[in-house]
Image (spheres, rainbow, N blue to C red):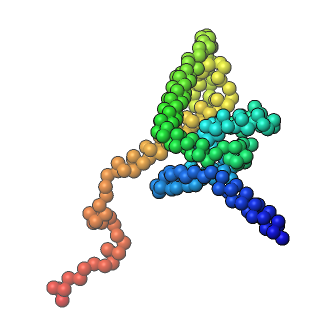
Amino acid sequence: MKKNKIIFLLILLLIVVHLLSAEEAKVTFKKAGKEVQFTISENYNLRALADSINMPIKKLKSMLTAELELYGETHPEFKGLKTQDRRWDEISLAGLNVSSATVADKFYSFTKKTMSFGGSITVVGILVVFFSLLLISIIINQFQHLAKAKKPKQKKSSKSASTTVQTPIGKVTGPTTSISSNAIVAVITALHKHKLSVEERVKIQMTFSRAPVNMWSALAKMEMPNSVYNKPIDRSKK
């Protein structure tokens, strides 16, 4: 019975020692305008840790290149694997044999260079946009040469012979290649419509040009049948 208690106490002591031996480090950073304090534990994998401390996962893995290479030497399936491979994301710090203090040092080193890192990204972005616009402007400028292609010279056509055709409204003269029955009918129709419109205008002009007639003044000059029977009565004779 005493031996069981001793064994239980030893196991409990080993567990406590193991828990105490697990290093933890605290980092402080700003997130959403607020200052946040986070405790780094070796039980976190790289993906969860990067999301928790607000640090790019690719940058974290690149700063842990030496530790990842050491891990690959003891694990053949990870040997020669690039640091940006996603298979590293699911391995914990304890599995990689990386202490929390090491990650904290890498984090503070990254935050100190954040301004220069962001500035370099900004400069690279500006240069890419500038050279892209320059290349596009050069390509567009070359389009103007496409419109300057030589146009084929048109051969001067010799004067075609003319033909005169007698119609009911007169003679119609035109090039031999253009004279046809349809063309003659079209010309006659156009002239006929023009003649009708001219006659209509003349009639309208004559209507408006007539002398005005005053019917009241012309009434005395006209013979009215009732005027003979309806004579005025002279009352002075009565």
Q: Is residue 47 above or below residue 125?
A: below
As drawn, 150 above or below 41: above
Quadrant hosting residue 237: bottom left
Q: Residue at x 59, y 16 (%)?
A: 149
Residue at screen point 55% across, 18% down:
145
Taking the image as drawn, is residue 118 in sight? no
The relative height of residue 117 versus residue 36 in the rendered view (above or below) is above
- Res. 41 in view: yes
The one nearer the camera, 208 or 128, is 128
Q: Quadrant of the C terminus?
A: bottom left
Q: Is residue 144 above or below residue 46?
A: above
Q: Residue lying at the far bottom in this picture: please name it.
A: 238
> x, y (%) of residue 220?
27, 66
Q: Position of residue 130 (x, y in %)?
A: 50, 29
Asked whether 78 or 193 is in front, the reply is 78
Residue at 47% over, 35% down:
116
